[in-house]
Image (spheres, rainbow, N blue to C red):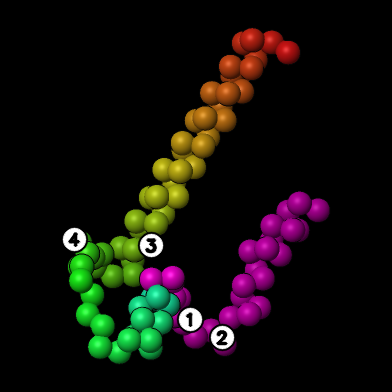
Amino acid sequence: MGLAAWILLAAAPAAWADGGEAVELKGSDDRAAEAVAEIAPGYRPWAQPLWEPGGMFSEELIFTLQAATGALVLGYLAGFLRGKTRREGP
C-alpha cells in the first residue's frame, strides 16, 4: 500500500502537466516584483542583490543544498535525542 501511494504521489504532477511543454515556475519574489510593477509602474528598487545566480540551474542547486543541509541538521538532532533517551532509559 505504501509503495503504491509513493508512486501515485510521484506521478500525479504529470497528470496536470501542460502537454509536455515546459512550465515556467514563479516564486514569491517574481510575483512580488509583478505586483509592485502593477501598483507603482515608476518604482525603482533602492537596493540590489550582492550576487545573483547565473541561471535556473544555479538557483536549483542552491535550493537543493539548503534543503540537504536542513535535512542533515534535523536528522542529526533526531538521532542525538533518540540516543540520549536510550542511554537514560525509560
Q: Residues within 10 Å of mark 3 (few under 14, many from 20)?
A: few
In the rendered image, residue 1, in percent from the top left (x then y), is placed at: 81, 53
The segment highlighted magenta reads 1-29
Give the residue pinned by disc 3. Answer: 60
Q: Earlier in the sequence, mark 4 or mark 1?
A: 1
Does the CB distance between marks 4 and 2 fall below 8 Å? no
First in sequence: mark 2 vs mark 1: 2
Q: Which residue is mark 2?
A: 18
Say if mark 2 contacts mark 1, CB within 8 Å.
Answer: yes
Mark 2 residue element: loop
Q: How many marks?
A: 4
Looking at the image, is mark 4 or mark 2 earlier in the sequence? 2
- Which residue type does callout 1 highlight? Val
Judging by the rendered image, the residue that carries numbered circle 4 is: 50
Circle 1 residue: 23
Tell me the distance, in whole angstroms, between the alpha carbons under discs 2 and 1.
7 Å
Q: Is residue 2 part of the magenta span, yes or no?
A: yes
